[in-house]
Image (cartoon, rainbow, N blue to C red):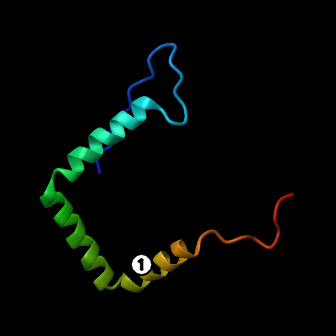
């Protein structure tokens, strides 16, 4: 995964949740990633090998925890 520095917001423009520049950067990088079919195939092959390999049980357990959603603690902050 490549990291890039985001452009600073134009002076006087509000940038926060729903930032236009962040959305533009995300869409640009997503489009370039989806356009490279060999890269997608390599990623899918790596994921398949991981699930079918020694770490498969751990990955399936993590998937199950993720699907179960957040756990609520017995002592909730009030």
- Most distant residue in the right direction: 78
Residue at the spot x=57%, y=76% of the render?
Answer: 68
On the picture, is 29 further left or further right than 18? left
- Most distant residue in the left direction: 38
Q: Nearer the viewer, residue 7 or 24?
A: 24
Residue at the spot x=14%, y=58% of the render?
Answer: 37
On the picture, is 9 further left or further right than 72? left
Residue at the spot x=38%, y=26% of the render?
Answer: 7
Please state the horizontal and vertical placement of residue 39, each as a whole percent of the image: 17, 58
- For residue 39, above or below residue 6: below
On the picture, is 46 further left or further right than 71? left
| Total numbered circles | 1
On the picture, is 5 further left or further right than 78? left
Q: Nearer the viewer, residue 44 or 49?
A: 44
Please state the horizontal and vertical placement of residue 65, each as a whole percent of the image: 54, 76
Q: Nearer the viewer, residue 26 or 60?
A: 26
The crowding category of the residue bearing disc 1, from other C-alpha atoms within 10 Å (few below 14, some 14 to 19, many at least 20), is: some
Q: Which residue is mark 1?
A: 59
Image-quadrant location for residue 5: top left
| Quadrant, the C terminus | bottom right
Please state the horizontal and vertical placement of residue 58, each as a whole percent of the image: 44, 81
Residue at the spot x=43%, y=23% of the render?
Answer: 8
Which element is circle 1 on? Answer: helix
- For residue 26, above or below residue 50: above
Image-quadrant location for residue 24: top left
């Amino acid at each position: 995964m490549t990291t890039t520095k985001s452009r600073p917001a134009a002076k006087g423009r509000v940038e926060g949740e729903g930032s236009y520049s962040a959305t533009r950067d995300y869409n640009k990088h997503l489009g370039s990633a989806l356009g490279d079919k060999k890269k997608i195939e390599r990623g899918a092959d790596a994921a398949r090998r991981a699930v079918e390999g020694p770490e498969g049980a751990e990955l399936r357990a993590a998937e199950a925890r993720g699907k179960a959603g957040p756990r609520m603690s017995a002592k909730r902050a009030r």
